[in-house]
Image (tube, rainbow, N blue to C red):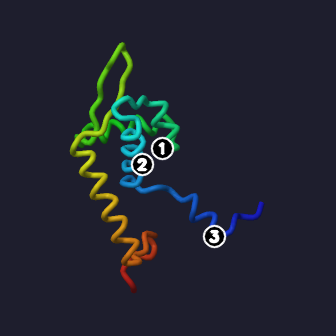
C-alpha cells in the first residue's frame, strides 16, 4: 500500500491536548449548559472513552461544571473555562500572525 502524500498525513496528525480541550469547550458552549456526553463526543470527533478522560480533567481544572437532572449528566462551561477559551483563541491568532510553526519538529533547537 502506498502511503498518502505528506500534506494528507499532516492533516490527520494527533491534536494537542489544548486543542482538544478548546474543541470540547466550544462544543459544550454551543449547547448552553445542556451538553450531554454523546453530543460532545460527536461534536469533538472523539470516542466516548477518551472524552470521559478529557471531561474529568476539565472538571478538575474548574473549566467545566457538571449538573445531574433526572439521572442524566449535563455539562456547562464555567467562567474559568470561558477565560481559557478567550486566551486560547488569542494565542492561536498570535501564532498565526507571527507565522510560528506548530509542528514539534520545527520547534526543536537547531544543532
Image quarter in which the N terminus is found = bottom right
The structure residue drawn at horizontal position 24% and vertical position 43%, both measured from the top left corner, is: 61
Q: Residue 97 location, x and y as percent?
A: 38, 75
Instruction: Write down the quadrant of residue 92 in the picture.
Output: bottom left
Say which mark, if any, is on residue 23: 2
Q: Is residue 101 above or below residue 28?
A: below
Distance in Å between CA atoms under marks 2 and 3: 25 Å
Q: Are marks 1 and 2 in contact (CB under 8 Å)?
A: yes
Residue 6 is left or right of residue 2, and the answer is left
Distance in Å between CA atoms under marks 1 and 2: 6 Å
> Mark 3 = which residue?
6
- Between 16 and 75, the one lying in front of the other is 75
The disc, 2 or 3, on the residue closer to the chain's N-terminal end is 3
Q: Residue 16 location, x and y as percent?
A: 42, 56
Q: Residue 86 location, x and y as percent?
A: 28, 55
> Mark 1 = which residue?
44
- Between 104 and 67, the one lying in front of the other is 67
Q: Residue 72 location, x and y as percent?
A: 38, 19
Image quarter in which the C terminus is found = bottom left
The disc, 3 or 1, on the residue closer to the chain's N-terminal end is 3
Instruction: Write down the quadrant of residue 60 in the picture.
Output: top left
Q: Judge depth for marks 3 and 1 and give the one in front.
A: 1
Could you tell me which secondary element the residue under label 3 belongs to?
helix
Instruction: Write down the quadrant of residue 50 in the picture.
Output: top left
Amino acid at each position: 500500500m502506498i502511503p498518502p502524500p505528506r500534506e494528507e498525513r499532516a492533516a490527520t496528525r494527533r491534536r494537542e491536548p489544548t486543542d482538544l480541550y478548546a474543541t470540547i469547550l466550544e462544543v459544550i458552549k454551543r449547547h448552553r449548559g445542556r451538553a450531554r456526553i454523546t453530543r460532545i463526543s460527536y461534536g469533538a470527533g472523539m470516542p466516548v472513552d477518551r472524552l470521559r478522560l478529557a471531561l474529568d480533567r476539565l472538571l478538575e481544572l474548574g473549566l467545566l461544571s457538571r449538573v445531574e437532572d433526572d439521572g442524566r449528566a449535563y455539562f456547562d462551561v464555567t467562567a474559568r473555562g470561558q477565560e481559557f477559551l478567550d486566551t486560547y483563541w488569542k494565542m492561536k491568532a498570535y501564532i498565526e500572525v507571527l507565522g510560528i510553526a506548530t509542528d514539534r519538529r520545527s520547534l526543536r533547537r537547531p544543532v
